[in-house]
């Protein structure tokens, strides 16, 4: 990508309006100082002393963090949180982000706030070590009333945004934001807005998403297409091309150390190799950085390869940020691409 083209694309980010539909969660980090370990008098078990607590939006919130880092002008998160302490923290963290409009973000006593609690052992001069995570989730179906509110906010946002990103983060179907009815509404929005980029990702796989762009990893591509792992690059290209044809929308595939792959329904396929690893890495959040950068790039008119190059650079930046779910700014992207 030439410097002029990079600038032409990214200079438009502050004028963008993007909607983000999905499962927002709270990432809460508990920083443990091993030098302050004690033993409980009552149980005889080790006591981990937490010396710092920090929280940030996670799940779909990680995509939001990356859109904010890119300088996107207005971001409309569409999702929910509970009326609990974690929900208060999450909403406050979202509201503190530049350009975030919370009109479509619901707080309800019918749901608990999806929370990832991450204990980290932090020792001087060493990389953080994450202990077993403590998760809080919903285990019952999302009430119909909340689904209806999500759909109304989606329909309202579609008329005023340049792109929509979607993330299903929950493992148990129908317990999060992106239910079957919400997927149907997304397909309807796609039909009525043929030139609106809508890109979806789901940790449960992307079956049931129709008429939208799909972003996935190699394992998910193989699962959707009935192929065996591992996939060599020519096979991955062929499968992505066929899926894009079936879906009638672009398909994006993350290939870990092999980079990114993109396919157009017309048959074009592009592959961008990964940047070399520059030290210790942590892959948490890389996929969400890819989604954010693909969405922003496509919203300002990037062609397939340009969108892949921007997203690939973002992933490289994020994996080198340890002990947090990282982001990539335009200036950081420029260091790698220009």
Image (cartoon, grey):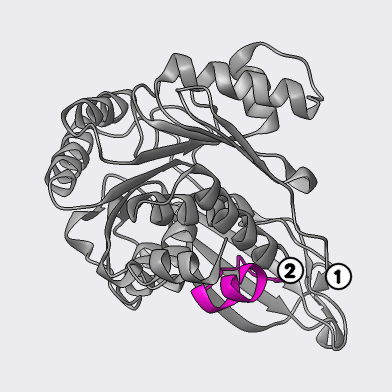
Q: Position of residue 150 (x, y in %)?
A: 21, 41
Return the residue nearer the eye: 22 or 264. Answer: 264
Q: CA distance from mark 2 to mark 1?
A: 7 Å
Q: On screen, 97 above or below 114?
A: below
Q: Secondary structure at mark 1?
A: loop
The residue under label 2 is 320
- In-image side of 288 versus 13 (left or right): right
Numbered disc total: 2
Start-end of magenta stretch: 320-338
Q: Residues within 10 Å of mark 2 (few under 14, many from 20)?
A: some
Magenta-span inclusion, residue 330: yes
Along the viewing direction, whichever of 330 and 81 lies nearer the viewer: 330
Image position of 276 with respect to 211: above or below:
below
Q: Residue at x 31, y 46 (%)?
A: 164
Q: Which of the numbered marks, if any, corresponds to residue 137?
A: none
Q: Earlier in the sequence, mark 2 or mark 1?
A: 1
Image x and y of residue 186, in percent? 27, 31
Quarter of the image for the C terminus: give it.
bottom right
Residue 240 lies left or right of residue 162; in this view the side is: right
Quadrant in the picture for residue 1: bottom right
Residue pushed farthest top?
226
Residue 83 placement (x, y as % from top left): 29, 59
Give the residue pinned by disc 1: 279
Q: Do residues under tags 2 and 1 come within 8 Å of each other at their CB atoms?
A: yes
């Amino acid at each position: 990508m030439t410097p002029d083209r990079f600038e032409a694309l990214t200079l438009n980010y502050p004028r963008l309006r993007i909607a983000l539909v999905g499962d927002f969660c709270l990432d809460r980090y508990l920083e443990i100082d091993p030098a302050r370990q004690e033993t409980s008098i009552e149980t005889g078990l080790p006591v981990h002393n937490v010396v710092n607590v920090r929280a940030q939006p996670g799940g779909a919130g990680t995509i939001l963090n990356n859109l904010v880092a890119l300088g996107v002008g207005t971001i409309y998160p569409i999702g929910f949180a509970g009326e609990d302490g974690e929900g208060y923290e999450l909403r406050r963290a979202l509201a503190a982000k530049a350009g975030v409009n919370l009109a479509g973000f619901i707080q309800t006593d019918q749901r608990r706030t999806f929370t990832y609690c991450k204990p980290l052992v932090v020792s001087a001069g060493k990389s953080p070590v994450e202990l077993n995570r403590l998760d809080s989730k919903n285990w019952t179906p999302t009430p119909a009333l909340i689904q209806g509110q999500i759909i109304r906010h989606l329909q309202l946002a579609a008329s005023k945004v340049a792109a929509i990103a979607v993330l299903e983060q929950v493992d148990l179907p129908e317990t999060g934001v992106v239910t079957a009815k919400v997927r149907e509404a997304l397909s309807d929005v796609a039909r009525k807005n043929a030139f609106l980029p809508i890109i979806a990702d789901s940790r449960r796989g992307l079956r049931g998403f129709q008429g939208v762009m799909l972003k996935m990893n190699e394992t998910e591509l193989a699962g959707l297409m009935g192929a065996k792992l591992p996939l060599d690059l020519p096979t991955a290209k062929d499968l992505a091309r066929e899926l894009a044809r079936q879906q009638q929308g672009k398909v994006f595939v993350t290939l870990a150390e092999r980079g990114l792959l993109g396919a157009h329904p017309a048959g074009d396929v592009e592959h961008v190799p990964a940047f070399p690893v520059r030290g210790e890495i942590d892959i948490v959040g890389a996929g969400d950085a890819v989604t954010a950068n693909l969405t922003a790039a496509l919203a300002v008119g990037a062609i397939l390869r340009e969108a892949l190059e921007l997203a690939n650079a973002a992933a490289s930046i994020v994996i080198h940020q340890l002990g947090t779910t990282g982001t990539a700014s335009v200036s950081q992207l420029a260091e790698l691409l220009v």
